[in-house]
Amino acid sequence: MFFCDNHTHSLISPDSDAPLADMARQAVSLGLDELCVTDHCDLVDGSGQPIDAFDWPAAKEQVRRVQAQVGNKLTLRLGLELGSAVYDPDLARRILAHGSPELDFVLGSLHNWLGERDNIDLYYTDYTSDSALARHCVERCLAHTWTLVTDCPDCYDSLAHIIYPLRYIQRDGLSLTLDGYEEQVRAIFTQVARTGHALEVNTCRGRSLAEWKPLLGWFRECGGEYVTLGSDAHRPQDLAKGLREAAQLLSQAGFRYVTTYEKRKPMPHTISE
């Protein structure tokens, strides 16, 4: 298979201290064909404070430098995980414009409560024994995701980890899934497919796999064609975890390709190649 990791972080992200050179060396040792670094640019940080810029010079320089170091052993792509674009779409577009012409790939993500709970990251909420709060969290996230895919299609290439709120809801002992939100999720997936965007299968460093099987079926039935794979690794030892299994899920769901991006254009690769 074409072996790629399209969701990774380096020390440019506030929650990683991994040099990109170390991530690239690990990618080479694992036999990856392609690595895309997608450092965080959340328009609202973890504590709910607005952010108005991204360090593009540092991001571009490290990709150029590390690509020169690894040569033809690995294709290195410059990506961005753009969080909460719906918070300030005009700012999101200005930030993305500064990434050109080198920018290859944009993950559209949502990590924060927006418009309530001081805009903090979902991570910092305690959902223990509060199923109503958990359901409200999922409903709010799906509503913001709908806004992203309908009003800000230029602010993402692949829809990142739609199951993100479930990470912390399940962390706190609740067993909520997206099964009860199928209508809303299918509407989102239909819009993603209709506009030629991709869905991300995010393995969360190899911890999330089975939950993607029904979602891939829904996406396929909604006309989805492009799927990107990402480990969400923040350190070299987590790189590519679960990606081979994720590719198998793609194939089982009827997808023929895994997709990467070059200059924000989809590049499908046959799963079996």
Image (tube, helix red, strand yellow):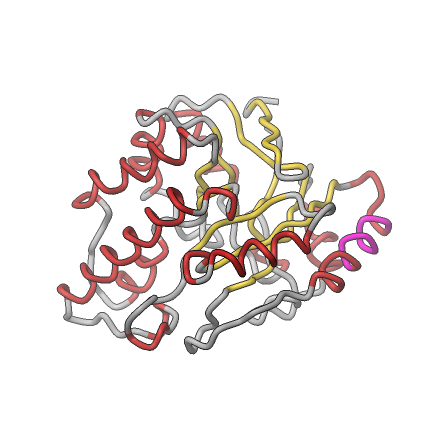
Name which residue lies at 73% across and 45% down. Answer: 101
Q: Is any part of residue 156 visible from this angle?
A: yes
- Relative to residue 272, is residue 59 depicted above or below? below
* Number of on-image labels: 0
Name which residue lies at 40% across and 49% down. Answer: 148
Q: Quadrant of the N terminus?
A: top right
Query: 230 or 78: which is nearer to us?
Result: 78
Image quadrant assignment for residue 126: bottom left
**Main SS type for the magenta part?**
helix
Residue 162 lies within the magenta run: no
Taking the image as shown, residue 182 lies to the left or right of residue 101, namely left
Query: 181 or 153: which is nearer to us?
Result: 153
Image quadrant assignment for residue 28: top right
Relative image position of residue 199 (x, y in whole percent)? 44, 38
Relative image position of residue 246 (x, y in whole percent)? 46, 38
Name which residue lies at 39% across and 70% down. Answer: 121
Q: Is any part of residue 29 visible from this angle?
A: no
- Relative to residue 92, is residue 200 depicted above or below? above
Relative image position of residue 178 (x, y in whole percent)? 24, 47
Taking the image as shown, residue 182 lies to the left or right of residue 220, namely left
Q: Quadrant of the C terminus?
A: top right
Image quadrant assignment for residue 164: bottom left
Taking the image as shown, residue 18 lies to the left or right of residue 133, namely right
Magenta-colored span = 62-68
- Relative to residue 140, is residue 240 depicted above or below? above
Query: 67 or 242: which is nearer to us?
Result: 67
